[in-house]
Image (spheres, rainbow, N blue to C red):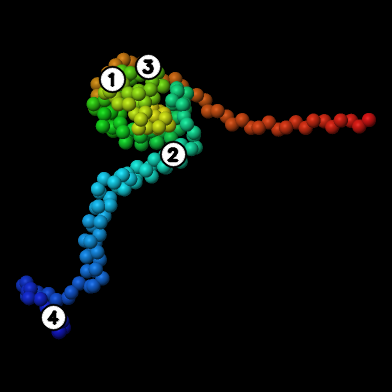
Amino acid sequence: MSEAPKTDHCYDGIEEFDNPLPAWWTAIFVLSILFAPLYWVYYQTGVEGRSAIEQYEQASAENTRLQFAEIGELTPDAPTILRFTQQDNWLSVGKSVFKSHCVSCHGADGQGQVGPNLTDEHFKNINQIQDIATVVANGAGNGAMPKWSDRLNVNEIVLVSAYVATLRGKNIEGGRVPEGREIAPWPEPPAEEEAVEPEAETAEPEETKA
């Protein structure tokens, strides 16, 4: 039998050895308790830029800026919005903007909650596709639709407008009843521009020697 000391605990004849916790485990436990208030003071006391959420938003914004460097600053007009309705990789950015800022009013799939249904054929403030970007940027309905131009850059406005345009006609089941009036279908997207190859320089004929 082992001669190791035992505790006074005994349950149904089962005894417990009195083995202390390893010193390294005890040290980690004590350090974690001491570290917790320091962590809380650093990250949770409202100092700007320190919270995990703010750091995530900063990293996300930087990533978005890097992505937008590929396309430059977009113009919120009909041809641009229509062009991006056909580009799934950029539509996913517009969808991300929608999920971050629009679902509380328009629902997760655009079916409408407080705000109107975006998946039917009726619109309250839209006559043409470029009006989506105008409404997103400037708001509508005396503030019922808030202004987003002070929180989103123009590329985000264009891409979320393109995403909203693709929701039209999906008629999500259980969506809010139609509001406004039915408008004409969106125009066809512009044809993809073909890359123009630089013309080869034409060599001038050498002058004939006399």
Three-letter amino acid code at disc 1? Gly
Relative depth, front residue between 113 and 14: 113
Residue for badge 3: 127
Q: Is residue 123 placed above or below 42 in the rendered structure?
A: above
Disc nearer the start of the sequence (4/1): 4
Disc nearer the start of the sequence (2/3): 2
Relative depth, front residue between 41 and 70: 41
Three-letter amino acid code at disc 3? Asn
Separation (CA) of disc 1 from disc 2: 31 Å
> Where does residue 15 sit, x and y in percent of width and height?
10, 75
Q: Is residue 163 placed above or below 50 in the rendered structure?
A: above
Separation (CA) of disc 3 from disc 1: 15 Å
SS category of the residue bearing label 4: loop
Separation (CA) of disc 4 from disc 2: 65 Å
> Where does residue 193 sit, x and y in percent of width and height?
55, 28
Q: Residue at x 91, y 32 (%)?
A: 209
Query: Crowdedness of circle 3 by 10 Å Cα count: few (<14), some, many (20+)?
Result: some
Relative depth, front residue between 97 and 144: 144
Residue for badge 2: 65
Disc nearer the start of the sequence (3/1): 3
Disc nearer the start of the sequence (4/3): 4
Separation (CA) of disc 4 from disc 1: 79 Å
Query: Crowdedness of circle 4 by 10 Å Cα count: few (<14), some, many (20+)?
Result: few
Tell me: 27 left or right of 97.
left
SS category of the residue bearing label 2: helix
Relative depth, front residue between 112 and 174: 112
Q: Nearer the viewer's eye, disc 4 or disc 1?
A: 1
Query: Crowdedness of circle 1 by 10 Å Cα count: few (<14), some, many (20+)?
Result: few
Residue for badge 4: 5
Three-letter amino acid code at disc 2? Arg
Residue for badge 1: 141
Q: Residue at x 40, y 32 (%)?
A: 153
